Amino acid sequence: MCTLEKLGNLFILTLTGDDEHRLNLSLIDSIKSALDRVTAEATGSSALITTAQGKFFSNGVDLTWALSDPSRYPLMNSKLKSLIFEFFNLPMPTIAAVTGHASAAGFVLAMSHDYILMRKDRGYLYMNEIDIGLKIPNWFVTLVKNKVKSPVAWREVVMRGTKLTADMAIEQGIVVSAHHGAAETMKEAIKLGEELIERKWNGEVYSHSRRVVFSDKQGNLFILTLTGDDEHRLNPSLIDSIRSALERITAEATGSSVLITTAQGKFFSNGYDLDLASSDLSSLELMDSKLKSLISELFNLPMPTIAAVTGHASAAGFILAMSHDYILMRKDRGFLYMSEIDIGLKIPNWFVTLVKNKVKSPVAWREVDMRGTKLTADMAIEQGIVVSAHQGAAETMKEAIKLGEVLMARKWDGKVYAHNRKLVFSDVLVVLNNEIASRL
């Protein structure tokens, strides 16, 4: 299976034995258990190295088992996706020290690390699906396209099954360095790990940055991230940027899809850009008009939508979160908060209509709109606003992705889904459409 060793703040996960390290359910579970330990035991700046004994880093999925029954391959694929998501959510830099062949899902496992160091005198990186007559999963290709430099290289790797040597993989930017022998490769991986630990990066920030870099689209799962460490105030530029992203999502969605919206930093969104709005009345009217159009587009999006709220969401930022079908919230930081009463602003009619459609009771409407109560995650769950609460940004995002996968697996028709949503929240859309029309 695998072992986990800890040298200071450097973790070394080793696939043990002289076999091909085929990714069966037992090995995947063993690796996932090791990653759970890594997350639990990490203190301060850390790094992970994954390596393997013998001639193979991993020769892919255990096809003998997976193809022996129609139900087994989907189960294996699901387990593997879950493992790869855990690597992407790990709160530290990750290094694959590849000292043997890595093919198919084994290649994907290596590419799920931030850095690959490779033995140059033995071993290939190889997507062999085309040679063995297996359809390559969509998410394999998405990962390849995010990790490999050019469309020409995508063709070579995915459509031709080219066996990449260490030098070829360095040319494509997949491998960072190549070394003679397993011992030298591992020595250089440890050296790199120690250099990364010395940077003393915040693990949660590092994990978040990784997800942003590779978050554009994961299969049919779209992840829209408000970037930067500011308050994500909803000014015309940010609203236009979000609307452009929604247009792309609508154009690129194929089959059953899901959108997750999240944000970097301490805020999901702190509402309107009030400095801009206070400069003249027309600026506030422009922001209100643009936000109404954005919210209408979210309600019309042909797929389920999830808000992964990992910081404060107040006023219009709370409205943005509530315009999604599901809200998952970080429980150790952040409030949901309609702040208008505290800052002396009249709350727009359509804000109230949305709140009354999304919040359980008249008592809660009073607390949210008329008292400006700051709702914690647990309080928001009681009111039916939030579906689940989680420790930390990484865990919240991990659970949002898991929910997204569950929803995609239902294979709902996007147009039918949007139609049903519009019926459920017809009161909101009537008010929105009337107000939008009144501005024309």
Image (cartoon, helix red, strand yellow):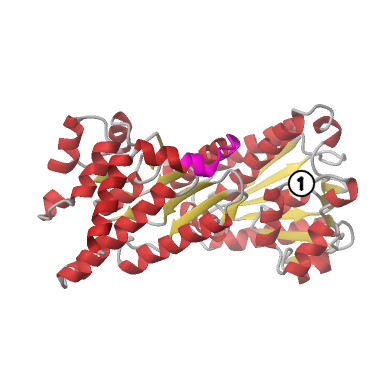
> Which residue is depicted at the point 17% across and 42% down?
369
Residue 439 at x, y percent in the picture: 23, 63
> Which residue is depicted at the point 77% across and 71% down?
171
Residue 59 at x, y percent in the picture: 83, 45
Q: Residues within 10 Å of mark 1 (few under 14, many from 20)?
A: many
Residue 298 showing in the rendered view: yes
Q: Which residue is mark 1?
A: 105
Q: Is residue 172 magenta?
A: no
**Viewed as shown, does residue 192 lie left or right of 439?**
right
The image quadrant where one finds the N terminus is: top right
- Taking depth in this image into account, of 183 and 114 the one nearest to the observer is 114
Specify the amino acid type for callout 1: Ala
Residue 267 showing in the rendered view: no
Q: Quadrant of residue 98?
A: bottom right
**Viewed as shown, does residue 13 lie left or right of 387?**
right
- Taking depth in this image into account, of 299 and 325 the one nearest to the observer is 299
Secondary structure beneath dot 1 equals helix
Tell me which segment is drawn in magenta: 408-417
* Depicted 148 relative to depicted 215: above or below: below
**Viewed as shown, does residue 435 lie left or right of 188?**
left
Residue 383 at x, y percent in the picture: 28, 31
Residue 239 at x, y percent in the picture: 36, 63
